[in-house]
Amino acid sequence: MILLRCPYCREMRSEAELTWGGEAGIMRPADPAIASDTEWTEYLFMRTNTKGWLQEQWCCSAGCGQWFKVERHTVSHQIRQILRFDEAFSDVTIAQEGAA
C-alpha cells in the first residue's frame, strides 16, 4: 500500500484516498488550437514508463484537494520526495542513484 503525507494539509493518506495523476512534468501543447496530431499524441500517450525512480503527481482527493509531486520507486514504492506543486525536485537524489 502506498502512504503519502500531503505537503499542504499534512495528513497521511493511503492510495485509496489519493488520485494518481501520472508522470510529473508533462507539458500540454502551448497553443492547443494549432497543435499537430503528433504533438497531441506525445502529450496524451507517450510516457517514460520507468522501472525505478519516477517523478509523479498526486491529488489529496479525500482531503484538501491539492495536487502535489512525489518521487517514488515504481517497484518498491519507496518514497524519496514529496513536494508542493510549486517546488522543484532535488537533483541530489538522482546523483545518489548513480552511486548505488
Image (cartoon, rainbow, N blue to C red):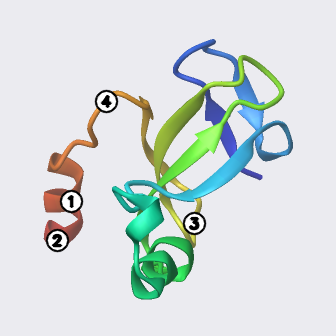
Most foreground residue, 45 or 59: 45
Per the image, label 4 sits on a secondary structure element best described as loop
Q: Earlier in the sequence, mark 3 or mark 1?
A: 3
Q: Earlier in the sequence, mark 4 or mark 2?
A: 4
Residue furthest top as drawn:
9
Which of the 4 image quadrants contains residue 12? top right
Q: Residue at x 68, y 52 (%)?
A: 20
* Residue that mark 1 sits on: 94
* Residue that mark 2 sits on: 98
Crowd band around label 1 with a 10 angstrom C-alpha radius: few (<14), some (14–19), many (20+): few
Q: Earlier in the sequence, mark 2 or mark 3?
A: 3
Q: CA distance from mark 4 to mark 2?
A: 23 Å
Answer yes or no: do the residues labelled 1 and 2 have beta carbons within 8 Å? yes
* Residue that mark 3 sits on: 76
Check disc 4 and give the amino acid type: Glu
Above or below, 41 against 58 in this view is below
* Residue that mark 4 sits on: 87
Q: Estimate the x, y position of residue 100 in percent, counting from the top left.
A: 22, 69
Q: CA distance from mark 3 to mark 4?
A: 24 Å
